[in-house]
Amino acid sequence: MKKLVFVYIGLIIAVALLAIMRSGGNISIPFGKSAEAQIGDKKINLILAKSDKDRIRGLSGRKNLEADRGMLFVFEKKDQYSFWMKEVNFPLDIIFIDANTVVDLFENVPPANNPANLTIYKPSQPANFVLELNAGQAKKLNIKKGSKITFKNI
């Protein structure tokens, strides 16, 4: 009987590890604390893009982004990372953040019409976070250069 219990536990662990590997390490546990951005008195729930695979995919292929959500690209070091709208189906605000200060932003960035000629969006200063929100959210939340954004559970 004890051997059977160990076999079941081993299978559960193997399935969990497989799920983590297939997701690129970006698993959200429903009963855990979710990542969020605090902008003034407003909170935005975050989808995290920490791995190269997740950062490359970004919001490509999605039909939409929920109104109270954003995607946060997390980088190990500060740099002037470039972004584009390849295969993104809806307009975005792209916000470049150094620690917790907005250093640059591009508002109402349209989806790419011509994948062969993509516009590249690059900040004027190095940043270690990039936050993508639905177009118009930066204005609605009064986000501009110098605004403070804090993060939880990233």
Image (spheres, rainbow, N blue to C red):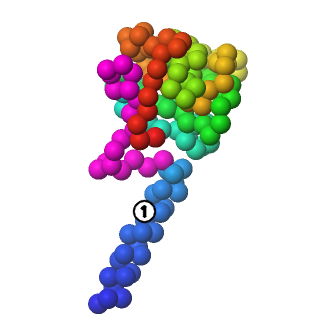
Residue 130 at least partly seen: no
Residue 56, placed above or below residue 88: below
In the rendered structure, which segment of residues is drawn in magenta? 26-43
Label 1 crowd (10 A; few <14 / some 14-19 / many >=20): few
Query: Quarter-wise, where is residue 137 in the image?
Result: top left
Residue 86, placed above or below residue 137: below
Secondary structure of the residue carrying tag 1 is helix
Find disc 1 in the rendering and name its residue. 16
Residue 3, placed above or below residue 37: below
Comparing 32 with 4, the one in front is: 32
Comparing 147 with 49, the one in front is: 147
Which percent across, then down, holds residue 21? 52, 57
Residue 127 placement, left or right of 22: right
Q: Residue at x 39, y 21 (%)?
A: 39
Residue 20 at least partly seen: yes
Q: Residue at x 52, y 38 (%)?
A: 49
Residue 133 placement, left or right of 94: left
Residue 69 placement, left or right of 71: left
Query: Quarter-wise, where is residue 118 in the image?
Result: top right
Comparing 34 with 15, the one in front is: 34
Q: Residue at x 34, y 44 (%)?
A: 33
Q: Residue at x 38, y 26 (%)?
A: 38
The verdict on residue 34 being magenta is yes
Which percent across, then down, holds residue 154? 46, 40
Which percent across, then down, holds residue 43? 34, 26
Which percent across, then down, holds residue 70? 43, 28
The verdict on residue 135 being magenta is no
In the picture, the quarter occupied by the N terminus is bottom left
Q: Amino acid at mark 1?
A: Ala
